[in-house]
Image (cartoon, helix red, strand yellow):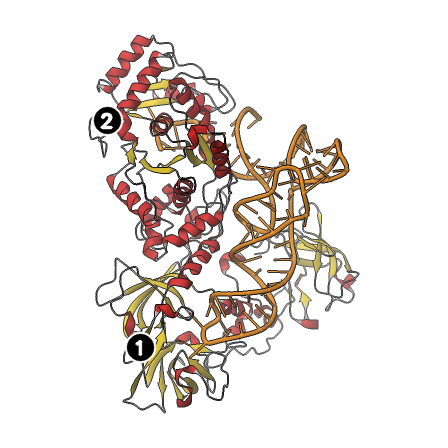
Amino acid sequence: MDFIRTIITDDIKNGKHGGRVHTRFPPEPNGYLHIGHAKSICLNFGIARDFQGRCNLRFDDTNPSKEDQEYIDSIIEDVRWLGFDWEDRLYFASDYSEQLYAFAEQLIKLGKAYVCDLSPEEIRQYRGTLTEPGKDSPYRNRPIGENLELFHRMRAGEFSDGSKVLRAKIDMASPNMNMRDPVMYRILSATHHRTGDSWCIYPMYDYAHPVSDSLEGITHSICTLEFEDHRPLYDWFLNELDIFRSRQIEFARLNLTHTVMSKRKLLQLVQENIVEGWDDPRMPTIAGLRRRGFTPASIRDFCDRIGVAKKDSLVDIALLEHCLREDLNEHAPRVMVILKPLKVVIDNYPEDQTEEFDIPFHPHDPGMGSRMVPFSRELYIELDDFQENPIPKFFRLSPGREVRLRGAYFITCTQALKDPGTGKIMEIHCTYDPETRGGDAPDSRKVRGTLHWVSARHALTAEVRLYDRLFTVENPIGEGEQHDFREFLNSSSVVKLGSCKIEPSLCGAAPLSRYQFERLGYFSVDPKDSTQDSLVFNRIVTLRDSWSKIEKTLPVARRQGVTISPAPPAQSSASSATARDMISVPEISIDDFVKLDLRIGVVREASPVDGSDKLVRLTVDVGDGRIRQILAGIRSAYQEPGVLVGRKVLVVVNLKPRKMKFGLSEGMILAAGEGNTLSICTVDEGPQPGDKVS
RNA sequence: UGGGAUGUCGUCUAAUGGCAGGACACGAGAUUUUGGAUCUCGUUAUGGUGGUUCGAAUCCACCCGUCCCAGCCA
């Protein structure tokens, strides 16, 4: 149970509010809701559900200059879609205008509020700073009668925008800035999206919110951490007015890796056409997630799992993806779609023959039924499922190899036809084994791979959009002040494939319906760009992919099926490693690589590590004023590590130190090669310890 | 440099003076007509230093790190 539910449980136990629990979700209609709001929605409505209470939907519409009906509509749609119900309790702070005004008059009469004629600039100056107290406004001690009269005239429209405000009279010397006579009302001659032109003064959040909560009998007013400093003010208004006392409780807002959450930055992405609108499937907005194909249940599950606390956090988007896959795995029907088609001709299959296979929609849920999938002599398979020179551990199709076509037959590749000019594979030829109909071998021989396929003659063509994370780094706004978050945009966050081959059962698929494209991921029908005869699919999320992990650990050259020929010794003076040595480094992106801080270091000591036959203990001076210990697995090449003393080496210095059995290792040194051909990259002259290597 | 918060595995989150647990991620294995799913196993944490106590993530003191606050925005 989270800390808020603990508080509420205690309140109920103590009979507070007669055991009544009433929350509210209070969005300002000035933007679209995002997944961070979903956390708040799930919290507020979830608490109401758990404690047999109620939750209101209330729009905090006190600033007509930023708000719009469009946002109200989208917010209502989004909260509903997430699966929550406010019954008849849809409220607007603007509905309380008269009450808010009357309470303000009451505070004036109590001598707790005054009309102030200072300009915005003067108010700022009078407020003081974080370390110095403010000073009283010259209008602070206006007589009550005069305040009342001026406030009436403010409402009547006698003064220009910004010329006067109503302020609470609290304490200009408070260490809490919010208590230094905060503004309660400002003059704003703007047309309000709901109240039109009937008002020209509008209450500020700090005043309107506690009063609105109180009016609605909200028992627990849950908001985010940045309002913690406002709580004394929240309580002050309710106390001075002596009205129902709601209790404000703050929790940490949601941050997600590989995206941004602030309304301002999301707006920027939209306005600068970095994305295609608020509902772009890459956006973390509810509208974007919905269009992408996310299920409301997976978002609710995610919000349950991230918990609620007061610590600032950055939740791994992998958790969201996990919740999605868990839901979709259970509920999405399986179909076969080829993203990048490669034609396969089955030479021993009769040219004019067609047959159909009855393939279930779900491997473990017979209740989902099945569909007939046509098969013929010419098929499409995935381009990636064929390699002429298969790399290690690749167990799909290659010349001479047998694989299973899902639910159909075993086929064996006999030949690959290449474009003589480019060497590109154009078409492959196979034979099939009629005895393996349905995908089982009568002699129970095994194949390593099972491929998805689509009959060429029966296939439909569709567009498929592959979406990926919007940003390449975990926290685009946390990379230091010299960086703009747009620097980290993922250039391949969307890849649109125009001529994908889909199985005929997909014909007429409904907008937003979700499928698993076998071996590829989960996809849904784009509701905006699909038409009756041309479907567009969005990739919601890939399948978990253990192959890509295997692939990443393979050396670049092997992965591409390149034969490495021995290279001549490198001429470079910066390194004694050869080109051949360098090529077998696992691939990382340039973005990853630039994060490495490589420095020249001088080896001061080098000795074998007792108890380890691989490690060498080095102490290295990298010019930062202290000597680092580095444990390196280079013993095989340096039986007598002493020879390294005095050499200049290349050190990665910005790594988190690793605690090893034999001590702390504070860096890595660059080495190349394998087995006993391994050698450390050394530098012979020029650079000094601490020099940056680029 | 004022005030308010907050520090537990890589990440999120439990443990309210008594065995530091779970989820995700990661790794290994089994299984598999999706390199999916499923199952089994595993690695990894109380910011630091003192103190109180039989016993401290928890209480106390000091230190350190991070976040928020000087809108007539919310």
- Residue A579 in the image: state x and y as whole percent: 59, 70
The first of marks 2 and 1 along the sequence is: 2
Chain of the residue under the numbered disc 1 shown in the image: A
User: Which residue is located at x 26 percent, y 63 percent?
Assistant: A510
Residue A269, placed above or below residue A492: above
The residue that disc 1 covers is A372
- Residue A581 in the image: state x and y as whole percent: 61, 70
Q: CA distance from mark 2 to mark 1?
A: 66 Å
| SS assignment at label 2 | loop
User: Which residue is located at x 21 percent, y 19 percent?
Assistant: A156
In the image, A495 versus A512, the foreground residue is A512
- Residue A263 in the image: state x and y as whole percent: 37, 42
* Image quadrant in which you'd find residue A323: bottom left
The residue that disc 2 covers is A189
Residue A407, placed above or below residue A27: below
Q: Amino acid at mark 2?
A: Ser
Chain of the residue under the numbered disc 2 shown in the image: A
